[in-house]
Image (spheres, rainbow, N blue to C red):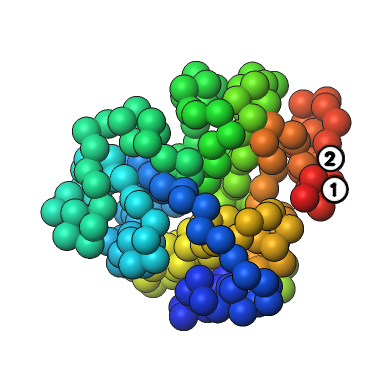
Amino acid sequence: MIMDDNYTPETQREAVGQETAHRNFAVGFLKGNTLSPAKNIVITPNCVKKLIDNEIPVFIERKLGKGADYIDLDYADVGATIEEDADAVCRQVQIIVRLSPFAPAELMSLKEESIFITPFSLEKADSETIAAITERRLTAISLNLIRNVDGDEFLQDIIQTKEGPWVASAALGNTILSLIFPLVFNDSLRYALQANPLLISSIYSYKGIITHPDVAERIGAQYTDLLLLC
């Protein structure tokens, strides 16, 4: 398992043993799915509700749940704000989640120092994408680089073996929460990493600085150990 189904900000506060501060981050969820295209994986309203219940504003691109039996009203009913398009969402949030990668031009339209969580293929890493990440000082978290607690299985493989899209969506949602909560409820990245070590392997850029050796090697650039930046 990637994380405990009972994960809450309270459990992660206990893990770091420190007073935490809500950083007033808003989270946006955008349409698109290349993480597991054979299954209709989505961010569920239940996942969104857990963020709302912890006073984290959530903005949803209209028709996010299309094809998965979720309508916009399902997300609105748990407290999310529905926006017409991705640009409207991105203007209002600091953390962006999409189950398909961003093109370089899309990255350039994000707020400076935004955090985005998407699939990322090391084999397809290119200098144009990394240049956009660097220029906008973006923190990039890859769903493809997340392994289970034993380090022997990737999240994407775990999702693909789940029985049915609903169970897979729940597993994905719990993983998304395990990434977001430490970032929102800690006043430093170091505490977030202590709360959730999965962040260490999944962050390949921190505020525009490349932190993954394989990404750096792919584009012929230098990288900095993430722990030296926090």
Is 51 rendered above or below residue 27? below
Q: Label 2 to label 1, Cα distance in Å? A: 7 Å
| Residue appearing at x 26%, y 52% in the figure | 80
Could you say where residue 199 lies in the image, as x and y percent from the top left?
Answer: 66, 57
Quarter of the image where the N terminus is located = bottom right
The quadrant where residue 68 appears: bottom left
Please tell me how many numbered marks the rendered image carries: 2
Position of 88 relative to 76 (above/below): above
Q: Residue at x 46, y 67 (%)?
A: 174
The residue closer to the viewer here, 217 or 26, is 26
**Three-letter code for the amino acid on which mark 1 is drawn:** Leu
Q: Would you say the residues marked 2 and 1 are in contact, meaning their CB atoms lie under 8 Å apart?
A: yes
Left or right side of 74 for 169? right
Which label belongs to residue 175?
none
Compared with residue 38, is residue 171 higher up or lower down, i.e. above or below? Answer: below
Q: Quadrant of residue 221?
A: top right
Is residue 192 in view from this perspective?
Answer: yes
| Circle 1 residues within 10 Å: few <14, some 14–19, many ≥20 | few
Residue labelled with disc 2: 224
**Of helix, strand and loop, which one carries label 1?**
helix
In-image side of 216 versus 133 (left or right):
right
Residue 131 % position (x, y): 67, 21
As helix, strand or loop, the secondary structure at mark 2 comes to: loop
Q: Quadrant of residue 3?
A: bottom right
Residue found at x 46% / y 48%: 25
Give the x, y percent position of residue 132. Answer: 61, 22
The residue to which callout 1 is attached is: 228
Please, what is the three-letter code of the amino acid marked with disc 2? Thr
